[in-house]
Every structure is written in C-alpha cells, then in structure tokens.
Amino acid sequence: MTPDVDLTALKPGRHAVRDALLALDCRLFEFAAARNWPLAEPVLPRLSRSANHGVLWFAAAAAMAASRTPRSRRAAARGVASLSLASLTINTLGKRSVRRPRPVLDPVPVVRQLKRQPITTSFPSGHSASAAAFAAGVALESPAWGAAVAPVAWSVALSRVYTGVHFPSDVLTGAALGVGAAFAVRGLVPTRAQIVPPARPRAEVPALPDGEGLIVVANGAAGSADRVHALQDALPGCEVVECQPSDVRAELEKAAARARVLGVCGGDGTVNAAAEVALRHDLPLAVLPGGTLNHFAYDLGLESAGDLARAVRGGEGVRVDAGRFTCDGTEGIFLNTCSLGVYPELVRERDRWSRRIGGWPAGVLAALRVLRADRHPLEAEFRGRAHPLWLLFVGNGTYHRVGLTPGRRHDLADGQLDVRVVHGGRRPAVRLLAAALAGPLTRSPVHAAVQVSRLHLAGVAPGSLLAYDGEVTQVEGEVTLEKLPEALTVYRPLPGN
C-alpha cells in the first residue's frame, strides 16, 4: 500500500446524486465482469501490462519515427509530449485529489485478473489517460497515424475494466484528461497544419497533368531514391536525372536548357544550386525535399512527393524572396540563412573531422574546439570602430518561434532580412545560449535583432567564413547582403485546393 491510499481520511457524507452515480458505476463494473468477452482473454491482460510505464507508447513512437517522414516524426514527438503531460497531471494531482480505492475483484474471473495488482488509487485511470493522450496527440498531427493508433488506445482503456483494476468512470475520466492534455500541448506548440503559409503572391506556372516538361535533378548522395520514385509514380511524364554531388550543377544547367520546369531533389545546398540556375534561366522551380533538414521545402509546405505532384498537376505556385550576398565581385544567393562567425567555423571543423569519426561526433568535437577558441571568429566595422562578434545571422524572411519550438518562417515573401547579432566577449557558449533563449523579439546585453532589406558590412577580416544554405565560402573587406523580392517562382499547393 502506498501513500496514495489514505485509509485514515474521513469518508465523505451522504450525497444523493453522487451516491447514485457511484452505485451506477459499480453496477456497470459488475455487468462488465459478468459478461463473456470473446477473444479478449489472451489479448487484453497482456495489452494492459504492455502499457505499464508507457512502454507500449514509447515503442509505437519509435516505430513511427523510424518511418523517416517529417509528419510521422512530428506525430511521434507530439504523442510522447501529450502522454508525458497527461501522466504528470494524473500522478501529481489526479490520484492524490480523489482517493478512491480499487474495485473489489470478487466478480472478476481469476483468468482475467492481472498477476500484479496496482496499489495506487483508482481514480482516474492513468493507463487510459496515457493511451488517450498519445492517440489524440498523434491524430492532431497525422490523422492517418491517429487512425492506426486509436484502436490500440481504445483496447488499452477497455482492458482496465476487463481486468478489474478500474471502474468505468475511472477510465472515462482518464481518457478525457488525456485528450485534454493533447490539446494543451497543441496550444503550446501548434501543429504545422495550424500555421499555413500565406498564399500570396500567387504566380502563373504551367500545369503539367502528367509531369511532361518537368526535369528533376536528384542528388544521389542524399538518399532520396524512394521519394524520386514516388514522384515518378505520381507524374509519369516527368524526367529524373540522378547524379553525384559533384555533377549536380552541370546537370542542372543541362536540364534548364530544355525543361519547362526545373525540378530538384536533395538537401538545402542542392536546392540552393537549383534556385540559382532557375533564376538565371527564368524558370519555375519544383522542390522535392530529399535532404536531412529541408528547411526551404518545409517552410513552403512541401513535405512529400504527393504535395509537389498535386501542385505541378494543378499549376499552383507562388513567388518567394531570395537573399543575395556580394563581396569583391563574388556573389551568391541564399534561400534560408546566411551567417558569419561561429557557425561557419563550426561547419568547417565538422567537415574536417566527419569522414574520420562520423557526423555526430564530428559536430560535438567542432563545437568544443570553436567555443573554446581564444579569438573571436568575426570582426566587423560599425561607425568607424571594429567590433568583435561571435555570430551574425541573416535569415531570408523573418523567423518566428512557434510556441516552444525552434523558429520557422510563415511568409517567404515579406521583403525582410532577419538580422541577429551575438556580440563578442568572454564565454561564447554562455553568450550563444543566452542569445538563443532571448529569442528574436527581445534584446539583451549579448544579443540584438533587427529586420532590414539590405545590410552592408565593412572591415571584415581576411579569411572570414560565410555559410549560406549549408555551403561555406571565404569573404573579406566589404560584404553586402540584400533581398531580391519575389525573385523566385516555385510550385506549392495552395491552401483550400
């Protein structure tokens, strides 16, 4: 017996409505115990035990995340977050507020009873709350996965009455609290479907019912073969050119010379190269996410081959901004971000070690080496004075926080560069963390943020690194960053279609 069951607590006085409801609850429990449940005996007790401590749901989340689709990963994360909130609420408030003893097991056949009986209080059902929270959280992000999980969650809740460890009202209340927890998590972290990118400005793009005229250049090193094949199934008339990273730019140039629509499948670096070619040839761009992060495609609302195929068939497109940097006659574009300082240094160090020790270890080692360096990675001139900086971040469009999640862009044609600066000083790791926590809408002694359409830097030290969409180049002297408003036309399924 645990402290959850307080036998010394005074019993409440008589209350007609409450007593009637409790009596009805007991009759329903006895009715369920007396029924013959076909095929339930070998399944429900085992299912009930598998849900102990959320093991069943964590395993389900791992299986969903293993599918490697963005929506599945988000659904798994939302389900676990909803389950965690529901479990915390039930165990800290629910069971300690209403100290209801467990049902008497006499009416329940021995074959149904659990080998190890729970010793916490009965109201509300924690298993039902966790099951409902996980299923509801998953369904809010991915209705398809929610439909697959819901029958299992329902069976877990039902098993608590079947095995005799809960009254029906315990299960119903727990399930209601679980669903409430899922909606509470959605209030803190809205689903991607709640934040639809604006449809403006729409662009006139050719509708290709079977994909004829679309040539897609796919980076073979990105591991995106499945997505490319899915696109070919949806658009049998399109042409796909798979190549190695070193050949991507040459193949893009060849495709642009004979395509009505230039397509690309790969990560943000590959998409950057395709966007530059599309701008020069004045072609609409069709982006199929095929990399690790795919920031540009996801901010557009493109997550799968089906999304892109729907837009290409319907001729649905928008115009988006691009960013451009220039330095001593050298120029490039960026669709996501451009940065100087710590991040380019980290990328260079990571690339130096990744082939020897692997990606994640190389990233950790690079962060340690860069953050422990005595020198500031960037110095820039402002009003005639040189200022040490740890980081200069420039986003193509304003990045917003969504609840507690990292930033993303809601509008890719807002005409703004999102500029953030982390000032130089001691303890770079602390300063970078403080800047990250400060967010884009606040100022702090280590962090500043502003939105502009053009930025000019002078006095950039020779050999300084500039990172843009995952690529790195060297700059020095004067660096100019500016917006190219609505310069690029891209396919994107429009809301409501």
Image (cartoon, rainbow, N blue to C red):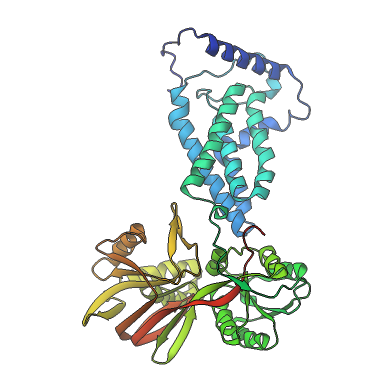
Residue situated in front as seen by the camera: 495 or 256:
495
User: How far from the left and from the top, in percent, is residue 290?
Assistant: 62, 70
Q: Quadrant of residue 309?
A: bottom right
Using residue 328 as the reference point, say whether residue 189 is left or right of it. right
Q: Residue furthest bottom?
A: 329
Q: Position of residue 403 (x, y in %)?
A: 44, 52
Residue 8 picture location, percent across and down:
41, 13
Q: Give the position of the C terminus as an image quadrant.
A: bottom right
- Residue 362 pos. (x, y %): 45, 70
Q: Considering depth in this image, is 172 or 126 the residue closer to the camera?
A: 172
Q: How many marks?
A: 0
From this view, report whether residue 11 is shown above or below residue 406. above
- Residue at screen point 31% across, 68% down: 422
Position of 153 relative to 95 (above/below)? below
- 31 horizontally vs 185: left or right: right
On the question of residue 166 being in view, the answer is: no
- Residue at image location 61% in from the left, 65% down from the top: 302
In this rendering, is residue 304 above or below 483? above
Residue 293's image quarter?
bottom right
User: Residue 74: in sight, yes or no?
Assistant: yes
